[in-house]
Amino acid sequence: MSSVFSPDTPKDLLDCIKMACGQGEKFEIRGQGSKRGWGRPIHNCRILDLGKLSGISLYEPKELVLSAAAGTTMKSIVETLRDNDQYLAFEPPKLSSLYDGSDKCGTLGGVIATNLSGPRRLSAGAARDHLLGFEAVSGAGEYFKSGGRVVKNVTGFDLSKLLAGSFGTLAAMTSITVKVLPRPNKSRTLLVRGLENKAAIKVLSGSLSLSLEVSGAAHLPIGISNKSSIPYISSDNSSVTVIRLEGHAPSVEARCKIVKKIWRQYGDIEELHTHNTEKFWNEISGIVTFLDQEANQIWRISVPPSQGAELLVKLKEKLKCDAFFDWGGGLIWLSESNETKYSEKIIREAMSEQSGHATLFRASDKDRESFDVFNPQPNALMNITRKIKKNFDPHGVLNPERMYEGV
């Protein structure tokens, strides 16, 4: 067996994994490798390249459903959907520039395997909420499938929810079916300047609590907003608090008027139209525009919005870091430049006083090996994680230790 195995068909993939089970081989699953730096590094494994399992097999715009092989590039899927004025509502970001500076767009399998979701997650849900079904080969060398082409109540074990976010540690997906939605014909981003973090999150939370159908809510502190390529955002050296409204033109205009009326007490309100709105939220989802590319570590921290500003104050007291807020203040993207082995301890200790979790999103191989990349699990939950891994992949064939040491 060569060091890189590229199956042409699902049957080839099945045969390969069966062979690995019998010979004690282990595989690192790869599509384009655009998110390879996310998770623990994998050593001494052959590459299982799913790039040849590619192509859209079914697309029914009227039924709002698309099926494609796991190795299908996100670029081809996005372009196909755009031609029909449709999109993936969970807004999967392109992260390759964060890891290797490339322009790789990733694959559908990679997006689902990491449950990768962008700023619209707060209104549309995560990638797993748009996964209708899949076909896969488990680490035990068994073909199986789950779900179908429609949203329905699930009885028994919901495998779609289990596979989404498993980082390829349970099975190699061959085919994926997702829900698609009509693309909004109008998008507007409203912004106000000069708010402190705590006040900004309070404003965002207030807007999200109203019936405004907000599809994006973020806050860029001073020193972060001026990194945007959009002059409306970067021209003034001040913080910027933003929300996005989308939909049919009359509805968007009416909701914009409501927000402007509520926000006018905070200062002048500016508005980005559709082109700049799309460009700006691509910067938010791609992360790299606003965070220091030379930073040793980048963390993704999820907290209740009411606790986000306080947590960042605590972290800035002990770490040299930059950060901005997404998901209405519930998601903190933080770049940390301290050359210290204690950064993880500082962040974990600060998180222990809050609700939420922290993920080491980018770091050196050394740091990703010595630190807990994903939030440490209580013993009871870790035991469940081990049992699930053992049931799907008893020989540890697929992406060994990608998420947790020894699993």
Image: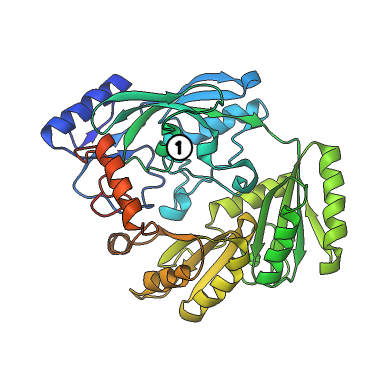
Give the residue pinned by disc 1: 161
Does residue 204 appear to the left or right of 300 in the view shown?
right
Question: Where on the picture, by quarter, is residue 242?
Answer: bottom right
The image shows residue 365 at horizontal and vertical percentages of 30, 59
What residue do we see at 63% from left, 65% from top? 306
The image shows residue 348 at horizontal and vertical percentages of 41, 68
Quick one: 357 or 66, which is closer to the camera?
Answer: 357
Looking at the image, can residue 176 be seen?
A: no
What sort of colour scheme is used for the picture?
rainbow
Number of residue marks: 1
What residue do we see at 58% from left, 27% from top? 80
The image shows residue 219 at horizontal and vertical percentages of 66, 62
Looking at the image, can residue 250 be seen?
A: yes
Does residue 293 appear to the left or right of 374 in the view shown?
right
Q: Quadrant of the N terminus?
A: top left
- Mark 1 is surrounded, within 10 Å at the Cα level, by few (under 14), some (14 to 19) or many (20 or more) other residues, namely some
What residue do we see at 19% from left, 38% from top? 395
Does residue 148 appear to the left or right of 190 in the view shown?
left
Does residue 337 appear to the left or right of 185 in the view shown?
left
Q: Is residue 207 above or below residue 181?
A: below
Question: Where on the picture, by quarter, is residue 387?
Answer: top left
The image shows residue 186 at horizontal and vertical percentages of 77, 39
* Element assignment for label 1: helix
Query: Which residue is situated farthest in the left direction here?
Result: 23
Q: Is residue 82 above or below residue 217?
A: above
Three-letter code, disc 1: Lys
Quick one: 86 or 301, which is closer to the camera?
Answer: 301
What residue do we see at 48% from left, 66% from top? 335
Query: Which residue is situated farthest in the bottom direction here?
Result: 317
